[in-house]
Image: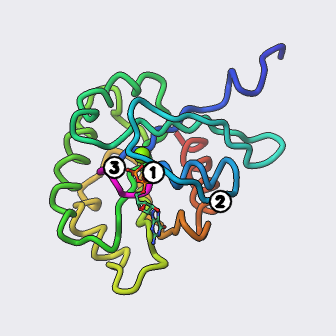
Amino acid sequence: MGHTQSATSPQVVLIGLDSAGKSTLLARLLTGQVVDTSPTIGFNVGSLDLDKKTSLTVWDVGGQKSMRANWRYHLDDCRALVFVVDSSDPARLPEAQKVLKKILSEEKLRGVPLMVLANKKDLAHCMTIREISTQLDLPSQEDRLWEIQACSALKGLGLLQAFMSISRLIKKT
Ligand SMILES: Nc1nc2c(ncn2[C@@H]2O[C@H](COP(=O)(O)OP(=O)(O)O)[C@@H](O)[C@H]2O)c(=O)[nH]1
Ligand SMILES: [Mg+2]
């Protein structure tokens, strides 16, 4: 008691390759709008109220190569990691897999749940959840809770469901 909601709301960090759709997703979640994003320099952050008792603080820490070294500084107090993938871009999945593996090896993220968002599901010829999950080697994540869901940041599809699931994952840890 005496604590404000924002002071206690769990921190969630969005990561993923540049152009996966992280900034679009965060903006859509927070404002319900599609905004013009430019490559994120630094970070965007916002508080997402899921219901009266549940809110999450969501960080978009940028995806450009030069920024990736900085991700680790955002991982203190991270209660869930959200890895955003462009599901219409199979050519970059191997790179995404490497980046994900590297970040998951961070000591600070031991046991922290993972939500993979297969974004851009509005586009034709997207990879399936199953294909992405295999290519990212998700089944090898034995020591953490993980889930994968499809969404479209552009159309606002699947976002709230995904973040409700994230909130449930956090409550289980
Ligand atoms: N078709 C489609 N395009 C998207 C979606 N989400 C993001 N984009 C587009 O992908 C590009 C990169 O998005 P951005 O949010 O800047 O990616 P970030 O680098 O991960 O922050 C932009 O042109 C977005 O409009 C989506 O769900 N569907
Ligand atoms: Mg961005």
At x 22%, y 72%, the residue is 90
Q: Quadrant of residue 14?
A: top left
Q: Which residues are magenta?
A: 17-21
> What residue is disc 3 on?
16
Marks 3/1 in contact by CB < 8 Å: the verdict is yes
> What residue is disc 2 on?
160
Query: Which residue is more in the foreground, 167 or 19?
Result: 19
Give how far apart the Cα atoms at labels 2 and 3 are: 19 Å
Q: Residue furthest top?
A: 2
> What residue is disc 1 on?
22
- Residue 132 position in % (x across, y down): 29, 70
Q: Determine if the C-beta at disc 1 is less than 8 A from ligand 1.
A: yes
Q: Earlier in the sequence, mark 1 or mark 2?
A: 1
Q: Main secondary structure of the magenta part?
A: loop
Q: Amino acid at mark 1?
A: Lys
Query: Which residue is more in the foreground, 105 or 85?
Result: 85
Tell me if 65 is positioned left or right of 152 in this view. Answer: left
Give how far apart the Cα atoms at labels 1 and 2 are: 14 Å
Q: Amino acid at mark 3?
A: Gly
**Residue 163: assigned label:** none
Tell me: residue 40, above or below residue 26.
above
Q: Determine if the C-beta at disc 3 is less than 8 A from ligand 1.
A: yes
Tell me if 97 is positioned left or right of 19 in this view. Answer: left
Q: Amino acid at mark 2?
A: Leu
Tell me: residue 134, above or below residue 9.
below
Q: Magenta span has 19? A: yes
Tell me: residue 140, above or below residue 112.
below
